[in-house]
Amino acid sequence: MGITSTVPAAGRRRGGARRLLRHKSGLVGLVVLLLLIVFSASIGLFTSTDPAAISLTSRLKPPMTTAGGAYHLLGTDALGRDVLVRMAYGARISLVIAFSAVAISLAIGVLIGLLAGYYGGWLDSLLMRVTDAQLAFPFILLALTVLAALGSGLPQLILVLGIGRWDVFARVVRGEVRSLMQRQQIEACRALGVGDWRVMAKHLLPNVLNTVLVVASFSVATNILTESALSFLGLGVDPSIPTWGSMLAEGRDYMRTGWWLTALPGAAIMVTVLAINSIGDWLRDALDPRQAD
């Protein structure tokens, strides 16, 4: 006997789809994100240009110019590398890091939130004090410390972002579970001797997933910003791998002579974050069971 909302699941899905069509910013955000994913994943089909290929005779060419026998839609950087190709590969890195880190944070935070909310008592107090300590510790300091100790790199950056953001999920899930524990269905399951893990997996977890998805969507946007900031500081992935943050760092010395080197990666970060936040806004509205069409 599970917990059911006042709106049937099929009705919520249909209502969510209709609200997406009416939620213009959410629809635009979804289209932008899908286009970015497709573009970054298929860039190799359209060009064989190496993002690390240096051509000093083509350096600092503005957008929509031809140099070195190739057309550069978004220009070239100080080493003659094609900006469009580097931005496409940088999008791959940003999205892989953001989504992978959220998966780690979600797994840790949901587990801690479920345990704290379900058992309560001393375990709840202990886990929430650990969560409070995590929330109180400056994330950027944690990231700098761990990356300085382990070295920079893609796995290390994903790990840092993953273990640095689980506290939000834990707090949200714990609050949701504590509310659900007051439901008669949960009390009946426990009275009938249903195992704790079965109750959590079948009756609690499905009812917190909507909230978790909304938090996860905003966390993806936060991770993209954080990854860009760390790469800008030189603490991201290997410098030979193009990222939006490292492109910003490389272009800051050429803001007068090569405005596109900072403007274009910065615009890409802004548009991507806005698109994901718009999707999060739509998810928040669409997954709210109190909103029925």
Image (spheres, rainbow, N blue to C red):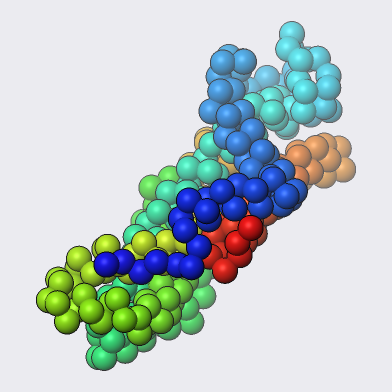
4 or 82: nearer the viewer: 4
204 or 106: nearer the viewer: 204
150 or 216: nearer the viewer: 216
Q: In this view, does 200 lie above or below 64?
A: below
188 or 131: nearer the viewer: 188
Q: Which residue lies furthest to the top in this view?
A: 69
Q: Residue 182 at x, y = what percent?
A: 35, 84
In the picture, residue 126 is in which quadrant? bottom left
Q: Residue 116 at x, y = what percent?
A: 30, 80
Residue visible at 46% across and 74% down? 172
Q: Residue 276 at x, y = what percent?
A: 62, 51
Q: Can residue 112 be seen in this view?
A: no
In the picture, residue 45 is in which quadrant? top right
Tally of numbered tags: 0
Q: Residue furthest left?
A: 193
Q: Residue furthest right?
A: 256
Residue visible at 47% across and 58% down? 8
Image quarter in which the N terminus is found: bottom left
Drawn side of residue 12 relative to residue 111, left or right: right
Residue visible at 80% across and 37% down? 260
